[in-house]
Image (cartoon, rainbow, N blue to C red):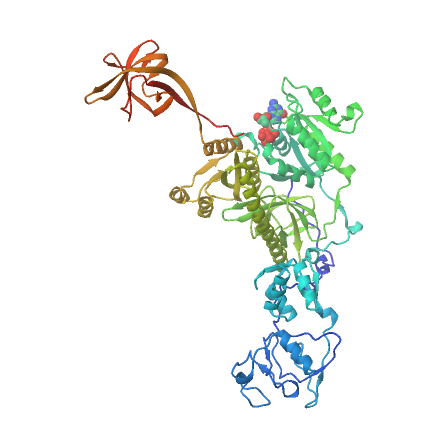
């Protein structure tokens, strides 16, 4: 395909300027000025003595009242400046007389004296000497505290000018225990605030302020290329078909024949450009495929003409239908002798895909990825369908789109393949996706060529993000990197809080589950893969192995080489490390063996699954089953020098075998259990003595034979436990 075309020049009015400024967002996380204050009852409007001199913005200032000097003589001491400083006015040392009063006492004293402590420490306008300043009640709108999700007790106390200890006491009275730094939720904060005459307003972090919904300007819409996903059952030829379309052959050297990487390519056809998303075929990649279906305009369902409709074909149909995406069927491998395209059409009929030839609406084309038969027609039909869909987008907006794939590359850092869906993505743009953000440092098209701008409908590789984003996540271009960072940090914080919550929940659930099952075994795994899609796929596949007896817990799943930190995580969690298409960093092998951590490397998902299943079995106690061999009756006991005690016996049932386990039974009670250490027939050491014959039996660690004892020989079989 051709390089993504240069996007149109920037519009005269830069849409970025439409974004409201971030200063409009008032969030409590901004630094606040901790000023202690007492709010007077709203009904009273009283006078108070003039506050002392000016103060700098943000200065912390405490006011102390000298008892007995309330009213006119009352003295204000700025303790924040100098605790030992003498108070003004009376000439008395403040520290002698001054005593810290609680907020309540202050309020009570003030009411008694009919004067109030000023609400704020702001510089008061100079009043006539001696004249009382008229106190104004705090305006209602200022008594609103905005809380995002939660607020710390100390922060709330500062915002309301109430002692944190008072808040804690109130909480205790209400049956809640909290410490000063503890976060309380918005509802609890609302309760506390109401107790002090404040109102809490829940304020969500308004992502819209950073990522505004701009009304669509119909006049600016231009046709964009269709985004096509190729889906179908494993080995039906998705990769080969994409290759045939791209006229390139990359399917050949693939590990296990599975498409390990999701890629996106734009193909220039005679009917215009078409963007293809390459989706892997293994069942484990279902999650990715689901996402694939959501960003896609058209699904090309590949069905092998010799194999017909298979489970993943059906799954693909379901997903495409759920996403309301038009399906185009490519009946592949028609070059094969066993190909029966009609049978495939019939089978598809059952899934409400009726071919056009039979009066239905679904385009079904016989193709061969190998001989390239039908490929030009397929592209033509895709272009035709795209025309019907009238796919349009506005290239003059801030770009928006979806992350198709992401990985960490040595020397390049996080690399994300994104699909631009709206607007034009340019180098230098500030971008946020999930909890990652950054400035677009460079962009490469599918041929590795640097591009400066990418229009809607085109994929591109983006460099410059803070970390590896999640495939399937949306991305947005925002005004500047600061805004991108704020949104990303907010999301990261939310995710952290959610995780904390779920960890707690999981621990509790685990406890209950353990109590029920009597302690289910669990295999912990640290997954590392070359790309995010694979990491996710491997994790999903491994987690699916979990049974009632053995659970599988993926402690972490990440992208890149296996690092020391992975080993330490695995060591702490007693986990194994599963590396997929990746390897340990230098010296990490050594650290792993020091830490007793097993690293297993794979390039084929089935092999990873099998190996982990084996490890799961290994966690279970083997089942030991007893297999009876035979019985012998002790007739006479011999004590032979240097050999020990030998029981001269007659084999009454089955066989007696050397090295077999045995029980010595006397009066139907077992007197010893051990191993048959020696077995003699006449004078010869033998391996086995059969029924009806006599022999000498020596049992390791047992000499107290008595005539009449019965030696019951048996073997132990270790049976592989089942996971179910
Ligand atoms: N004869 C014939 N063989 C084909 C054709 N298309 C694909 N194959 C073969 O079928 C096998 C699977 O093809 P892939 O393209 O890897 O299939 P896939 O659906 O991408 O497989 P996964 O990525 O594992 O899901 C390969 O051996 C291909 O050479 C075709 O049109 N004719």
> Is residue 665 left or right of 184 when viewed as pictured?
left
Q: Residue furthest top?
A: 692
Q: Quadrant of the N terminus?
A: top right
Question: Horizontal and vertical percent for residue 139?
Answer: 74, 72
> Is residue 42 left or right of 624 when viewed as pictured?
right
Question: Horizontal and vertical percent for residue 605?
Answer: 53, 33
Instruction: Look at the image and tell me whether residue 240 can be seen.
Output: no
Question: Horizontal and vertical percent for residue 643?
Answer: 22, 21
Q: Quadrant of the C terminus?
A: top right
The quadrant in which residue 694 appears is top left
Q: Is residue 430 above or below residue 533?
A: below
At 76% across and 25% down in the image, what residue appears?
355
Q: Is residue 594 above or below residue 234?
A: below
Nearer to me, 520 or 697? 697
The quadrant in which residue 267 appears is top right
Instruction: Look at the image and tell me whether residue 234 can be seen.
Output: yes
């Amino acid at each position: 395909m051709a390089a993504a075309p240069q996007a149109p020049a920037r519009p005269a009015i830069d849409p970025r300027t439409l974004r409201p400024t971030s200063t409009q967002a008032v969030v409590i996380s901004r630094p606040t000025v901790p000023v202690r204050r007492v709010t007077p009852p709203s009904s009273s409007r009283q006078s108070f003595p003039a506050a002392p001199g000016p103060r700098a913005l943000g200065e912390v200032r405490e006011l102390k009242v000298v008892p007995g000097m309330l009213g006119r003589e009352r003295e204000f001491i700025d303790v924040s400046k100098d605790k030992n400083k003498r108070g003004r006015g009376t000439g008395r040392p403040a520290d002698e007389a001054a005593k810290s009063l609680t907020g309540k006492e202050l309020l009570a004293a003030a009411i008694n004296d009919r004067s109030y402590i000023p609400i704020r420490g702001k510089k008061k306008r100079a009043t006539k000497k001696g004249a009382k300043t008229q106190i104004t009640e705090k305006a209602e709108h200022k008594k609103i505290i905005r809380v995002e999700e939660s607020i710390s007790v100390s922060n709330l106390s500062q915002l309301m000018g109430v002692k944190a200890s008072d808040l804690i006491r109130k909480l205790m009275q209400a049956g809640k225990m909290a410490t000063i730094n503890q976060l309380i939720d918005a509802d609890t904060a609302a309760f506390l605030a109401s107790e002090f005459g404040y109102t809490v307003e829940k304020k969500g972090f308004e992502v819209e302020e950073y990522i505004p919904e701009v009304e669509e300007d119909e006049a600016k819409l231009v046709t964009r290329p269709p985004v096509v996903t190729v889906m179908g059952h494993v080995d039906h030829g998705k990769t080969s078909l994409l290759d045939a379309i791209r006229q390139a052959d990359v399917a050949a050297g693939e590990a296990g024949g599975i498409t390990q990487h999701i890629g996106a390519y734009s193909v220039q056809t005679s009917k215009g450009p078409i963007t293809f998303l390459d989706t892997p075929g293994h069942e484990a990649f279902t999650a990715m495929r689901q996402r694939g279906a959501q960003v896609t305009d058209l699904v090309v369902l590949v069905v092998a003409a010799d194999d017909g409709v298979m489970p993943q074909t059906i799954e693909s149909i379901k997903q495409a239908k759920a996403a309301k995406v038009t399906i185009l069927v490519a009946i592949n491998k028609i070059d094969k002798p066993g190909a029966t395209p009609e049978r495939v059409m019939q089978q598809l009929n059952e899934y409400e895909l009726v071919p056009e030839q039979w009066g239905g609406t679904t385009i079904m084309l016989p193709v061969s990825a190998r001989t390239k038969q039908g490929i030009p027609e397929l592209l033509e039909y895709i272009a035709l369908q795209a025309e019907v869909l009238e796919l349009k987008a506005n290239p003059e907006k801030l770009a928006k789109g979806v992350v198709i794939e992401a990985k960490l590359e040595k020397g390049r850092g996080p690399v994300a393949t994104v699909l631009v869906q709206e607007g034009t993505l340019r180098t230098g743009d500030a971008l946020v996706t999930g909890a990652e953000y950054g400035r677009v440092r460079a962009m490469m098209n599918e041929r590795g060529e640097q591009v400066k701008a990418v229009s809607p409908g085109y994929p591109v590789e983006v460099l410059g993000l803070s970390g590896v984003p999640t495939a399937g996540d949306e991305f947005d271009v925002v005004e500047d990197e600061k805004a991108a960072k704020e949104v990303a940090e907010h999301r990261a914080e939310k995710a952290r809080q959610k995780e904390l919550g779920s960890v707690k929940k999981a621990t509790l659930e685990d406890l209950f589950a353990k109590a029920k099952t009597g302690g289910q075994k669990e295999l912990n795994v640290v997954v590392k893969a070359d790309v995010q899609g694979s990491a996710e796929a491997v994790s999903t596949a491994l987690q699916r192995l979990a049974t009632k007896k053995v659970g599988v817990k993926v402690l972490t799943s990440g992208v890149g080489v296996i690092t020391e930190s992975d080993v330490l995580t695995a060591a702490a969690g007693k986990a194994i490390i599963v590396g997929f298409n990746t390897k340990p960093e230098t010296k990490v092998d050594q650290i792993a063996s020091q830490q007793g951590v097993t690293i297993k490397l794979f390039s084929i998902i089935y092999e990873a699954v099998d190996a982990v299943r084996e490890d799961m079995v290994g966690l279970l106690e083997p089942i030991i089953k007893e297999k009876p061999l035979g019985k012998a009756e002790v007739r006479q006991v011999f004590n032979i020098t240097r050999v020990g005690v030998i029981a001269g016996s007659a084999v009454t049932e089955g066989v007696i075998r050397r090295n077999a386990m045995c029980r010595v039974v006397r009066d139907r009670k077992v007197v010893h259990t051990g191993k048959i250490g020696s077995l003699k027939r006449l004078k010869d050491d033998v391996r086995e003595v059969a029924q009806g014959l006599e022999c000498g039996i020596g049992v390791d660690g047992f000499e107290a034979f008595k005539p009449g004892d019965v030696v019951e020989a048996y073997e132990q079989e270790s049976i592989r436990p089942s996971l179910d």
